[in-house]
Amino acid sequence: MTKVPLQNKSIKVIHIITGLGIGGAEMMLYKLLSAMDKEQFEQCVISLTGHGAVGKKIQQLGISVWALGMRPSLPDARLVATLVKKLRQEQADIIQTWMYHADLLGGIAARLAGNKRVIWGMRNTDLSPLRVKRRTIWTARLCALLSHWLPQRIVINSQVSRQTHIRLGYRADKMVVIPNGFDLQVFKPDQEARISVRQELGIEDQTPLIGMIARFDSQKDHLNFVQAAALLSARMPQTRYLLCGEGITWQNQMLAGWIDTTGLRNVFHLLGEREDIPRLMAALDIATLSSVGEAFPNVVGEAMACAIPCVVTDAGDSAYIVGDTGRVVARRNPHALAQAWNQVLEMPIAAREQMGKAARARIEQEFSLARICTQYEELYRQIVYTV
């Protein structure tokens, strides 16, 4: 990306996003807003739906959040007209949209409001009708047609996602790959957190603990994780397993049934949704992701920033993130996953610690929030001052 010199005038950016519940895109927007130069960039956020938990976090940064109140099921023409009016009033230099529905509605509203500096944001890699709503698929396909004239740039967060969208017909020469960034002050090695989490769960310090932070979703393939746990426990019965995320509770009959089939209920900890993810990450011996589909998974980079070795399936950009600092195995292969866990746990403690340090160093060098934030800032300056 061509570096554009600083200008005296601040750049006003309006971010339009489908919603502000907890999610990868929503949290990346929050992190970006928290780190960007507030003197160089004036920013506000518009949610097509509601404020959500992330909206409240953004407001605590002193950034205004306006919720349109649109129902997810059907766009409301009157609310789109309200959005156009709002954009005309705000007179932003750039409109950045996040995710398909916001790309479509926000992009059209921006053009109707007279703003041609539109940046789209794409993050999906899997548009299978088995896992994605039909409405989302059709929205993505419509955006592919509009991509040739509506946005000036399309930000993609992974190489896998870039290839997915090129195959769908998106304008390749408008795409800019900017990966997710990680706050190294929030996600870091923390011995006190390790001790306190293990005390909370009743786990000794030397007991192996393997964890996965992911909502209950078919793409995350929790069955793969559970089956791998059964295989590893036959070799290393002392190992414990931590699962955390939306839908990850014992009330989830499908997940609980899988675990009970293995007879391992007593070594699984299902924590549901938690807000102390950095603390939980720091307590693990191995962080894992058993997914069949991903784009650029935040949880892998977050665990690496905590100096936790990662074992991941080859989904999305997971292998690219990990590099040579962990293990990558085939998808839907619990035997391979269990074997990789076993290999890491059997390493001498010093070697495992060195693997974790190498993981954190990779995040520092390639994916720090400061580095990613700079890439967004340069893109904004390029759009305003050279395009």
Image (cartoon, grey):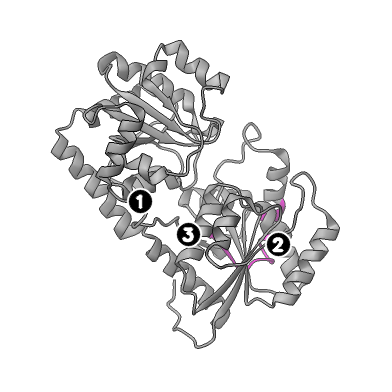
Q: Decide: is 270 above or below 136.
A: above
Reading the image, the residue beneath label 3 is 31
Element on which disc 3 rests: helix
What is the x, y in percent for residue 156?
A: 52, 56
Which residue is situated farthest in the bottom direction here?
Answer: 8
Mark 3 is surrounded, within 10 Å at the Cα level, by few (under 14), some (14 to 19) or many (20 or more) other residues, namely many
The answer for how far apart the CA atoms under marks 1 and 2 are is 33 Å
Q: In the rendering, which numbered label is found on residue 187?
A: 1
Element on which disc 2 rests: helix
Q: Give the range drawn in magenta.
A: 142-156
Which residue is situated farthest in the right direction here?
Answer: 78
Tag 3 near tag 1, CB within 8 Å: no
Mark 2 is surrounded, within 10 Å at the Cα level, by few (under 14), some (14 to 19) or many (20 or more) other residues, namely many
Residue 144 is a magenta residue: yes
Nearer to us of marks 1 and 2 is 1
Sequence order check: which comes first, mark 3 or mark 2? 3
Q: Decide: is 113 above or below 55.
A: below
Look at 19% across and 41% down and name the residue there.
Answer: 353
What is the x, y in percent for residue 263?
A: 41, 11
Task: Give, as a three-letter code, the residue at label 2.
Answer: Gly
Tag 1 near tag 2, CB within 8 Å: no
Task: Give, as a three-letter code, the residue at label 1.
Answer: Phe
* Front one among 66 and 318: 66
Name which quarter of the figure residue 111 lies in: bottom right
Nearer to us of marks 3 and 2 is 3
Quarter of the C terminus within the rendering: bottom right
